[in-house]
Amino acid sequence: MTTDTSNATSRLPLTTTQIAILVGIGAALWLAAALMLRALAPMGVYDGLGRVALYVLTVPGTYPFILIARAAARLRADQIAIAVTVATATAALLDGIALAWFPALYGSDAGQVAGAGAAILWGAGVALALGLAMNRTSNP
């Protein structure tokens, strides 16, 4: 990761700029999800059909953000999986920190905190699966 124009010596097939953009997107999406889940918690989103709807809607709700990341970081089709991994790793790390040290970010009681943490982990899994499914081999 010595320059933005060449990644021949990089461990990842991404430039430094692409990685920075993806880390920023991962952090922003994590924070948006955490705040959204906190706002939805009093509406019963972690109970019964609310939870089912939340988990089901996470799948189509995640897809546009992968397209946004692809455009923002100017990714090739063969970089999607690794790019989603970088953004998701960022979100997962922030989620772990927040759950351990700032649980009030997710809600006022243990059920809300657990529900939000589980929903974010589900979203991370969905993003990784979509990233793998959307990744394509480049044609030289």
Image (cartoon, rainbow, N blue to C red):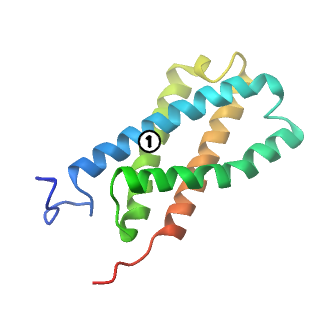
Instruction: Give whichever of 115, 65 is nearer the camera.
Output: 65
Position of 47 with respect to 36 (left or right) is right
In the picture shown, does residue 134 fall above or below 91?
A: below
- The location of residue 121, given as percent across then percent down, is 60, 44
How many numbered marks, from 0 up? 1
Q: Amino acid at mark 1?
A: Gly
Report x, y in % for residue 67: 49, 56
Q: Left or right? Give the position of 49 relative to 112.
A: right
Relative to 17, is 41 on the left or the right? Answer: right
Residue at x 51%, y 68% (from the top left corner): 134
Residue displayed at 56% across by 52% down:
64
Check the image and report above or below for 99 versus 54. Answer: above
Q: In the rendered view, does 96 fall on the left or right side of 43?
A: left
Relative to 109, does residue 41 appear above or below in the rendering? below
Q: Residues within 10 Å of mark 1 (few under 14, many from 20)?
A: many
Give the secondary structure at mark 1: helix
Query: Where is the C terminus found, in terms of image quarters?
Result: bottom left
Which percent across, then down, holds residue 76? 35, 66
Of the pair 105 and 21, the residue shown nearer to us: 21
Quarter holding the N terminus is bottom left
| Residue matched to label 1 | 26
Above or below 17: residue 46: above
Which corner quadrant of the image does residue 126 belong to? bottom right
| Residue at 43% in and 36% down | 27
Q: Quick one: which residue is furthest to the left in this view?
A: 2
Q: Position of residue 72 (x, y in %)?
A: 37, 49
Residue 111 visible at all:
no
Residue drawn at the location 80% of the way across and 41% of the way down: 51
